[in-house]
Image (cartoon, grey):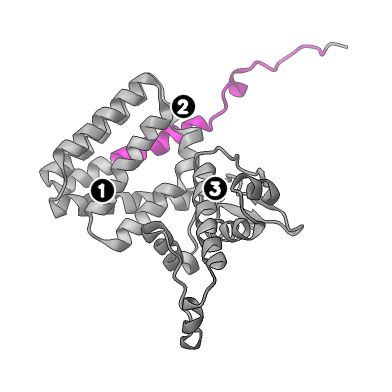
């Protein structure tokens, strides 16, 4: 099965996924002949559905924040014990995560967290850059940005960066970017830019925030401030350019982090090998 470097939400699950994330419910389209069954559904079944969503949300957060490592096997029995439920809600949660490419089902019927690979990294970076620029431009044009809230988030970001609190800095950055997505007023842009942010989380946790040097941390704060000021002032071109500069900066750090740490500087020339 093809693996992806980042989690991508499958198109067939978009409506189901959106309902879960926005309303905390699953609302499949039932044939009219089955409509009566919904009202007669037993409390046990309804409780199982809620249990599946709770397991899904917890596992999704664990995977995205690398509390469960890429490639790690999923133990359904242990998860059922952890969440004090049967294995059925666990399996339903895994199906939802599989729809987002966060887990993979193997031929031997086991399940693993999707590994990080590079097979479509370029496509992801291109798509994310386009979506991010569109979100910045659209959020700027709406003129609904709250100056106080955005500047407060920026101060939190810079404080976390200064303290070396990578996870807190990332959470603050995500909060600000999701705020921009909502400011667009476009449900499609909000949804797909949000998915794109999720798709790059594991890569940023591993290859961006921990790899920033002091100069790059300052640079990230300056670029984020420029983006915020552009959105607040209503300058769409400046917002577009600021977002582009910020994303390109992030990509540059990620690519640099993949460069050999020492192998290119080792002198392997020897006149004779020891016996």
Residue 222 image-quadrant placement: top left
- Magenta-colored span: 245-273
From the top left corner, tell me how far across and down residue 170 is, in percent. Answer: 39, 35
Disc on the earlier residue, 3 or 1: 3
Mark drawn on residue 59:
3
Give the position of the C terminus as an image quadrant.
top right
Q: Nearer the viewer, mark 3 or mark 1?
A: 3
From the top left corner, tell me how far across and down residue 250 is, in percent. Answer: 39, 36
Q: Is residue 39 found left or right of 88 in the rendered image?
A: left
Q: Secondary structure at mark 2?
A: helix
| Residue displayed at 40% across by 62% down | 18
Give the CA separation, mark 3 to mark 1. Answer: 26 Å
Q: Secondary structure at mark 1?
A: helix
Against 150, residue 163 (above or below) is: above
Give the position of the N terminus as an image quadrant.
bottom right
Disc on the earlier residue, 1 or 2: 1
Instruction: Name the outermost residue toward the right.
Output: 275
Q: Which residue is mark 2?
A: 211
From the top left corner, tell me how far across and down residue 94 is, in percent. Answer: 59, 56
Give the CA separation, mark 1 to mark 2. Answer: 26 Å
> In front: 230, or 62?
62
**Residue 143: in sight, yes or no?**
yes
Disc on the earlier residue, 2 or 3: 3
Against 160, residue 22 (above or below) is: below
């Amino acid at each position: 099965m093809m693996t992806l470097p980042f989690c991508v939400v499958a198109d067939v699950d978009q409506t189901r996924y959106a309902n879960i994330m926005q309303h905390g419910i699953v609302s499949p389209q039932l044939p009219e002949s089955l409509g009566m069954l919904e009202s007669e559904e037993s409390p046990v079944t309804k409780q199982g559905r809620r249990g599946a969503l709770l397991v899904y949300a917890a596992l999704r957060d664990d995977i995205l924040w690398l509390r469960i490592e890429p490639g790690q096997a999923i133990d359904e029995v242990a998860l059922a014990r952890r969440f004090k439920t049967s294995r059925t809600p666990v399996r339903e949660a895994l199906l939802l995560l599989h729809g987002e490419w966060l887990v993979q089902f193997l031929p031997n019927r086991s399940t693993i967290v999707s590994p990080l690979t590079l097979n479509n990294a370029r496509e992801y970076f291109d798509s994310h850059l386009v979506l991010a620029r569109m979100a910045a431009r659209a959020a700027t044009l709406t003129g609904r940005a709250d100056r106080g809230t955005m500047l407060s988030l920026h101060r939190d970001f810079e404080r976390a960066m200064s303290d070396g609190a990578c996870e807190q800095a990332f959470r603050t950055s995500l909060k600000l970017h999701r705020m921009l997505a909502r400011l667009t007023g476009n449900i499609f842009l909000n949804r797909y830019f949000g998915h794109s942010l999720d798709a790059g989380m594991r890569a940023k946790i591993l290859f961006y925030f921990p790899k920033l040097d002091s100069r790059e941390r300052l640079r990230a704060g300056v670029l984020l401030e420029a983006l915020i000021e552009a959105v607040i002032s209503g300058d769409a071109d400046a917002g577009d350019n600021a977002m582009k500069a910020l994303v390109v900066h992030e990509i540059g750090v990620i690519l640099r982090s993949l460069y050999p740490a020492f192998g290119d500087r080792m002198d392997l020339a020897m006149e004779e090998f020891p016996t």
